[in-house]
Image (spheres, rainbow, N blue to C red):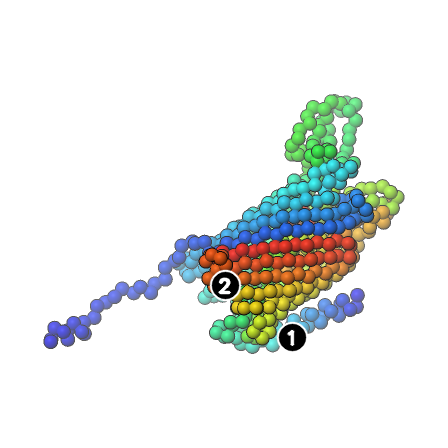
Amino acid sequence: MKSQVLMKYCAVLLAGLILGSCAHVRAYQKSRINDSEMILANRKVEKNEINAQTYREGSSGANGGKTGGGCGCN
Amino acid sequence: MYLVLLHAFSQVSTKDTSTYKPKKLKLDEINLVSSYYNQTADKSAVMGGIPGPKGIGDVTDLANGVELTFVSWDGKHRKNSFTGSFGIDYHTAASQAFVDSNGHARNNGTRIYPTLDWTIENEKKGTEFGIGLYYSAEHNYYHSKGLNASFAKKTNNNGEFSLKVTGYFDQIKMIKPAEFERVDSVKNVAPTDSVVYITTASGRTEALIYNAGGLINNGRSNTLIPSKSRNTYTTSLSFSQVINQRMQGSIDMDLVYQNGYLGLPFHRVFFNNGKDTIENLPAQRFKVPIGLRLNYFLGDHFILRAYYRFYIDNWGLTSHTAELEVPVKITPFFSLSPFYRYYVQTAVNYFAGYEAHSSTDSYYTSNNALAAFKSSSFGLGLRLAPPKGVLIKNLSAVEIRYGHYTQTTDLVSDIISMNLKFK
């Protein structure tokens, strides 16, 4: 349990450090950022896989999928 | 000579043609997504978590969906996107047969789910508004209507905030296991009608109406089956940021509130005294999942896609999800993406296994989805997106993805999915 709390706080701290150290990136420098597989979301092909997880697991959300309701799931 | 010089220096006024003209609605993209899902499991919720043949939770599901996106530009140079989708799933579920206690109930069903979305984007201001509608009819017991509204705003330094509010308003038909339906004696002489719902050996749910001791209607429609509502309200907050030329990340958080009937009427619970009942869960639930994404373009051929989610709710469940996917660009137009996902959750406060609950418990469930367990899944994705299309010009991308999933509850599943993208 303590390791889970520690993992949670480390993840949030890491996110803050990374997002706070941003470089200014111009449009012509975004060739890699704009790659279709760099998108910050699930792929469309994952949609039904995520739906299945919603039915089989007790948690959901924060991934662009359902958070509950709209289906006979949790 | 004089006339030539005059002509050379003559100026003809031309009309200014740089005025922007709106662009009509046109079909921009079509996505077809299909999946086949196969699951083997034990201790199904329909049979109260009982192990063995009666607790089999084997499932197959064939899901198909089509999504069309239309785009137009209005007089103010704003991009309007209209997206309509339609999905249809067909499933078989071994546990569904045991809604009838002898295992003769219908074990298959169909779900349809259309959606409509409209977004309007102002590139100059960096803002985007959107609204959406959703409907789902699942088999014969679940109907849902949903709507959402969203707003997004880009920052000056390659960041973006977004806010989305969503509501789902569900109706669950109270189809109970057959042994829990009230059976009136045929000798009932009450003047009012009494209604009995049964799940027959043919798998049909029927409403039998008795009056003055006699059966007056064995109507085969299920319109008399009562429903209970379940409402879900979600506020989704998101922030994404380009960190450098190779890395970008995002934070997503949902605040979810549910009220109403939050169980399912055909999930049994067996008490430690041998008696069985239907699961009973609280009428409110508050959930908070927080997700972090970080994508990094490593070298020229590798991308690291990392995802972590922490989840907590007021039913006592907490979970951690960690996933890593590594697309390998074999060529600029062909990539393979192995992935691994790890998941761990604690049980909700109201869970206990087969014959582990006490009849004095206020709330109780034996649904393994709410138990404590760990799961892992791994698989491989393939993406093909050549500039001249795959086989035909308009088929701009093909993605195929396979995943294998295991839970410590003895649930094992496989899923294979395909996405065809037409531009």
For residue B8, above or below residue B264: below
| Residue at mark 2 | B386
**B191 relative to B72 in the view: left or right:** right
Q: Give x and y (percent) for residue B33.
A: 57, 53
Looking at the rendered image, the quarter that the N terminus of chain B falls into is bottom left
**B277 relative to B165 in the view: left or right:** right
Q: Amino acid at mark 2?
A: Pro
Disc 1 residue crowd, few under 14, some 14–19, many 20+, Cα 10 Å: few
User: Which of the chains bears the disc numbered 1?
Assistant: A
Q: List the single residue furthest toward the right.
A: B273
Kindly identify the residue that appears in the image at 70 percent across and 47 percent down.
B59
Q: Quadrant of residue B47?
A: top right
Q: Give x and y (percent) for residue B10.
A: 18, 71
Res. B391 in view: yes
Kindly identify the residue that appears in the image at 73 percent across and 33 percent down.
B201
**B82 relative to B59 in the view: left or right:** left
Kindly identify the residue that appears in the image at 61 percent across and 49 percent down.
B63
